[in-house]
Image (cartoon, rainbow, N blue to C red):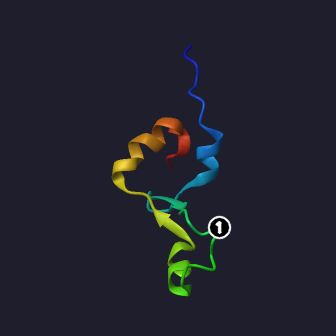
């Protein structure tokens, strides 16, 4: 019997699959040095971002059971 592939625990905490099958994650640049950034920019950085299709292969490589 073959062994199962282990999913990266860090990847499982960072990425989520939506109901439609898209992959989302929180973006960078919204944790510190916020006094320099405009309110509009901070609002755009806050929240989940859809991951591009070019990155999906890399992410599913480290977290193969992330798919729905």
Q: Which residue is mark 1?
A: 31
The correct choice, above or below, for 2 with respect to 7 in the image is above
The correct choice, above or below, for 56 with respect to 7 in the image is below
- What's the residue at 51%, 49% (across, down)? 68
Closer-to-camera residue (53/38): 38
- Counting from the top left corner in percent of width and height, residue 3 is at 58, 19
- Counting from the top left corner in percent of width and height, residue 23 is at 47, 56
Q: Residues within 10 Å of mark 1 (few under 14, many from 20)?
A: few
Which of the image's four quarters has the N terminus? top right
The residue positioned farthest toward the bottom in the image shown: 39
Closer-to-camera residue (35/55): 35
Mark 1, secondary structure of its residue? loop
- Counting from the top left corner in percent of width and height, residue 9 is at 65, 41
- What's the residue at 54%, 84% (across, down)? 38
- Counting from the top left corner in percent of width and height, residue 7 is at 59, 36
Hey, which quadrant is residue 31 in on the image? bottom right
Closer-to-camera residue (68/47): 47
- What's the residue at 63%, 80% (across, down)? 35
In the rendered structure, the answer to whether residue 36 lies left or right of residue 19 reads: right
The correct choice, above or below, for 16 with respect to 5 in the image is below
Hey, which quadrant is residue 22 in on the image? bottom left
In the rendered structure, the answer to whether residue 11 lies left or right of residue 44 reads: right
């Amino acid at each position: 019997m073959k062994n199962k592939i282990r999913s990266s625990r860090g990847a499982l905490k960072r990425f989520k699959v939506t109901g439609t099958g898209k992959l989302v994650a929180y973006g960078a640049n919204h944790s510190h040095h916020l006094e320099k950034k405009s309110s509009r920019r901070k609002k755009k950085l806050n929240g989940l971002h859809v991951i591009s299709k070019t990155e999906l292969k890399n992410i599913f490589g480290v977290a193969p059971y992330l798919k729905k």
